[in-house]
Image (tube, rainbow, N blue to C red):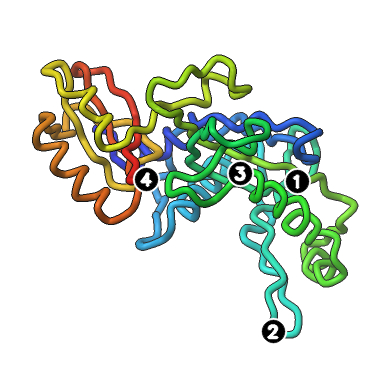
Amino acid sequence: MISSLQQQYIGFLNTPQLQLFAEDFPYSNFRLTEVLEKLPVDFIMPDSIRLGQRMEMFMQAALSSDRYQISSKNLQIITKKQTLGELDFILNDLVLKKIIHLEMVYKFYFYRPELSGSWIDKLIGPNAKDKLRFKLNKMSSHQFPILYRPETAIYLNNLNLKAEDLIQQISFKAQVYFPFNQKIYDSGISEDQIQGFYFKLEELEFFNKNDFTFYIPNKNDWVSSPIFKTTKTDNFSVFIKKISAVLEEQRSYMFWVFESDSKFKRHFATYW
């Protein structure tokens, strides 16, 4: 039987990238191809690390194929005991014969139609923080330019590299959720990016039907799909008590809705 860790890895691989264009973000999307679809036998996921760090571990596993050669991971640039920043990956694409400075991001976003601006300005994290526009601006103004700082040259020299030898790319995987009953076709976001909807507590009454059962996954499983044979689901009355208790902690949370033994949808319940 497939393990939950392997299921999370598959979910990571299958999560689409945000389609960012040059006018919004000056760095091109990294195309992850010819990857390992199964985690290596000796793969170990460290305990008690953040979800973003788990995704970095999955990216490292995906890049451990014949096509890529990883020169460094999480290369910290330190000067005078001060950390200026970190380069996520430096890797060699042996097919394209290019050396890549790769920054990676994995996020969950809510589409907030009441906000002004483009679709980028309307994507915010589930707890009403973590704006996409702010993230992109920070990466453009700070994260990527670190490569060209004089302090970084020493670290690159240890890898027999120069900054001008590298191209810079981004892997920005994201799950996007829309408000309940919101039309999605005119948002500017590709439909494959949209995973489900977010609901206020009172809106969850929509699911109070015999057709549905529910499961509240651990945060590490937010990236994955359920293992149907081992996922123990709840009826609506049990689910609504559990999700209400979670929302009282002032945090939005994912839940899965099952319509059959092989069909499910991801959604979020939100406290605000």
Tell me the number on the disc at residue 81: 2
Would you identify the image quadrant in which residue 67 lies? top right
Please give the name of the residue rendered at 14% of the width and 32% of the height, measured from the top-left corner.
233
Specify the amino acid type for callout 2. Answer: Lys
At label 1, the amino acid type is Ile
- Does 32 appear above or below 271? above
Q: Nearer the viewer, residue 161 or 129?
A: 129
Q: Nearer the viewer, mark 1 or mark 3?
A: 3
Q: Residue 145 vs residue 240: left or right?
A: right
Which numbered disc, 2 or 3, marks the residue closer to the eye?
3
Quadrant hosting residue 260: top left
Q: Residue at x 75, y 59 (%)?
A: 142
- The residue carrying pointer 2 sits among few (fewer than 14), some (14 to 19) or many (20 or more) residues within 10 Å by Cα, namely few
* Residue on which disc 1 sits: 100
Q: Give the side of residue 270 with respect to residue 246, left or right.
A: right
- Which residue lies under the disc numbered 4? 272
Query: Crowding at label 1, few (<14), some or many (≥20) Cα neighbours within 10 Å?
Result: many
Cβ atoms at labels 1 and 4 below 8 Å apart? no
> Comparing marks 1 and 2, which lies closer to the viewer?
2
Query: Quadrant location of the C terminus?
Result: top left
| Distance between mark 4 and mark 2 Cα atoms | 41 Å
Relative horizontal placement of residue 123, taking residue 207 as reference (left or right): right
